[in-house]
Amino acid sequence: MKAAVYHGSGDLRVEEVPVRKLKDNEVKIQVKYCGICGTDIHIFHGDGGCCDVTPPLVPGHEFSGVVAEVGAGVKTVKVGDRVTGDPNDMCGECYFCKNGMQHFCKNNIGIGTTVDGGFAEYVIMREKQVYKVSDELSFIEAAMAEPISCCLHGIDLCNIKAGDTVLVMGGGPIGMIMMQLAKNAGASKVIMSEPVEEKREQALKLGATKTIDPLHEDVEAVLAEYCENVNVVIECVGNVHTQADAVRFAGRGATIMYFGLAAPEESFPIRPDDIFKKELHITSSYINPYSFERAIQILESGTVELESLITNVVPLDDIADVFTKPEYRRTGKVMIQIS
C-alpha cells in the first residue's frame, strides 16, 4: 500500500509499504481522510508528541474510512461499515487503567505515534477502538472525531459554568472548536484573542461575543472594559509567550487550560504570588480519555460547525508540502485525502 513514512526529523516520504496480516481481534480500515494535527507537526520536526516516536513510522491519528477486512473474532463491525477510530488503545490492566486514569496507561498503543497510523491507504487497529458513524456524517467530518474528543476532555477540565466568561487564545481549528464547546457548555461571554483578522471574523460567525487583536490592542485593558472577571482561559497557541500571558489575563479564581503543545524543552517563568493572589487553577489536557463516543454524538448533532475550519484538502502524494510550506500554517485545518 501507499503510505507517508516518517524516517526522522524533517524526513517524510510517500512510499510503498507492506500490509500485515490481521489478528483475530483487529480491523483493517481503508482510509478516506486523515487530518494533520499539531502533534504530527511536532513529530515531523523531531520534537515528539504525547508518546515517544521511533522511526520509521506512518504518522496520522485523525482518520475515517471504510472497513475493508475484519479478523476472525470481530463481531461489532463488518466490511463496508463507515468508521472512525480512537488512536489511543489502553491495556486495561496497569495501575492507571484500573484506577480511572486510562490515558496515563503504561502500555498505551498510539496509532500514528507508537505504531503505524492513518497517512496510508489502510490502517489496522483493534476492534474496540473502531467506532461506526452514521451515513449522514461525511468522511471529512468523521475524521474530526479525534480532535473533538481531545477538546472535550479539555473542556471537561475547565469546569465551565453557565454564565462564565471564557477567553480562548489562538484562532486555529482547535481554538475555534474550543470556543464553540465553551459556548455550548454555558459560557455567556466567549472572547477570542487572535492576531489574524480573517480568523477574528470567523470567530464572530462561530459564536464569539468579542474578539481581540493581541498584536495591536492592550488585551488586559480590553478585558477590563468588557467583563468583570475572566473565569476560564484556554490557551490553544502552544507558545510559551502566550502561555505566560494566560496567567496575566486570567481573572480571580480562574482556571487556565494549557491545551496548545509547546516544544518539550521550552519553559517560561511564573511567579507563585500571581497564582496565590488570584487563586488560579492551572491545568492541561492529555489526549482523550472517555470522550470518543461523545465526540461522535456531537459531530452527528451538528452543534459544532466544522466546514469552515477545513481550508485545505491535499492528496497523499503531496503531504510533505503541508509540513514544509509556511502558507499551510497560516490557514485552517488540513485534511489529507487518501482514497
Image (cartoon, rainbow, N blue to C red):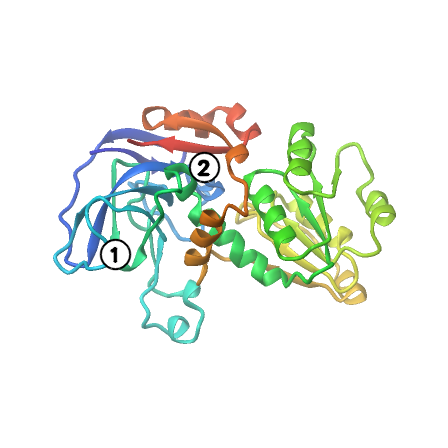
Q: Dot 1: what SS?
A: strand
Q: Give residue 317's position: percent from left, percent from top.
A: 32, 25
Q: Is residue 92 above or below residue 314?
A: below
Cα separation between marks 1 and 2? 29 Å
- The residue wearing badge 1 is 126
Q: Give residue 72's position: percent from left, percent from top.
A: 12, 57
* Picture residue at 65% right of the left edge, 51% below the top: 183
Q: Quarter of the image containing the N terminus?
A: top left
- Going by the numbered disc 1, the residue's amino acid type is Arg
Q: Give residue 259's position: percent from left, percent from top.
A: 57, 51
**Residue 285 seen anywhere in this rendered image of the structure:** no
- Going by the numbered disc 2, the residue's amino acid type is His
**Residue 106 seen anywhere in this rendered image of the structure:** yes
Q: Which mark is residue 99?
A: none
* Mark 1, other Cα within 10 Å: few <14 / some 14–19 / many ≥20: many
Task: Looking at this view, name the residue that lies furthest to the front.
Answer: 136
Q: Is residue 39 left or right of residue 81?
A: right
Between 320 and 55, the residue placed more toward the observer is: 320
Q: Dot 2: what SS?
A: loop
Between 145 and 1, the residue placed more toward the observer is: 145
- The residue wearing badge 2 is 45
Q: Give residue 42's position: percent from left, percent from top.
A: 47, 41
Q: Is residue 252 above or below residue 56?
A: below
Between 328 and 159, the residue placed more toward the observer is: 159
Q: Is residue 55 left or right of residue 334?
A: left
Q: Is residue 2 above or below residue 49?
A: above
